[in-house]
Image: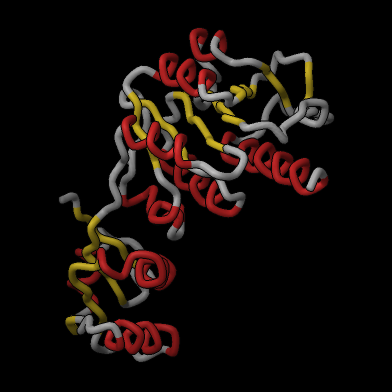
Amino acid sequence: MKSSKLFGIHAAQAALDYSANKIIRVWVDAQRSDKRLVKLINDLQVIGIEPEKTDKKKLDRLADGGNHQGIAMEVELPGELPESELKDAVQRLSATALFLVLDNVQDPHNLGACLRTADATGVDGVIITKDNSAGITPTVCKVASGAAETVPVYQVTNLARTLRWLKEQGIWIVGAAGEATQTVHQADLTVPLVLVIGAEGSGLRRLTKENCDLLINLPMLGQVESLNLSVATGVLLYEVIRQRQVNL
């Protein structure tokens, strides 16, 4: 079991809301009685978790100097799922597939932000590579604000092979690439879909790109050449949702 420390009101509330069964231990500042902290303590007590009262110095150590707002938790981290579970999930789908692939994305903040957007847009799962990629870490969980618990994260060894298998299941592979000649608004995203996003700076790897059925880009009307990875992912996923709702 992997466990880690979370701290701060927002992170603690997300853990309580989405993964209360994963909370191992809780510490709170005995000297603080602000409204949000008191409510959180009461909510924890309701489900049978009694926070340990301590002092600010210990919380500072637990949070490694971060802004803990009077609370820290030890929680069991969600884990990445194997490729076999991805295959099971695909074959169980009853609605139109929507998966997100992050090709060697290494920034945990980007992974966390992508998970949060994936949850908001109803993505069936996020697929990451086993090597050269961010996995689920405390930073990812904090940025994801609960989405690391709600969105399955599948870790695969050979992404190209996985993409080929997904195509065999009737799912279209659509990659985001700046050099694409078709914009996201021109593409039909109502089909069963895997959206593939490349790494920060380098974009999609050659073999990944070769396994895409279609490459799309975002219209860039200003001076900057690209958007932040997680921002671009959000724009693309919401275009998928827009198209699918229009076509209901």
Q: Position of residue 198 (x, y in %)?
A: 53, 24
The relative height of residue 28 versus residue 243 in the rendered view (above or below) is below
- Quadrant of the rendered image containing residue 105: top left
The relative height of residue 53 versus residue 62 in the rendered view (above or below) is below
How many numbered circles does the render carry? 0
> Which of these two is toward me, 61 or 165?
165
> Which of these two is toward me, 151 or 35?
151
> Which of these two is toward me, 215 or 169?
169
What residue do we see at 27% from left, 89% from top?
31
> Which of these two is toward me, 39 or 182?
182
Q: Position of residue 149 (x, y in %)?
A: 38, 55
The relative height of residue 103 versus residue 60 in the rendered view (above or below) is above
What residue do we see at 44% from left, 69% from top?
10
Colour scheme shown: secondary structure
- Quadrant of the rendered image containing residue 22: bottom left
In the rendered structure, the answer to whether residue 17 lies left or right of residue 97 reads left
Q: Position of residue 51 (x, y in %)?
A: 21, 81
In the rendered structure, the answer to whether residue 32 lies left or right of residue 224 reads left
In the rendered structure, the answer to whether residue 133 lies left or right of residue 240 reads left
What residue do we see at 30% from left, 88% from top?
46
What residue do we see at 33% from left, 30% from top?
83
Q: Position of residue 57 (x, y in %)?
A: 20, 73
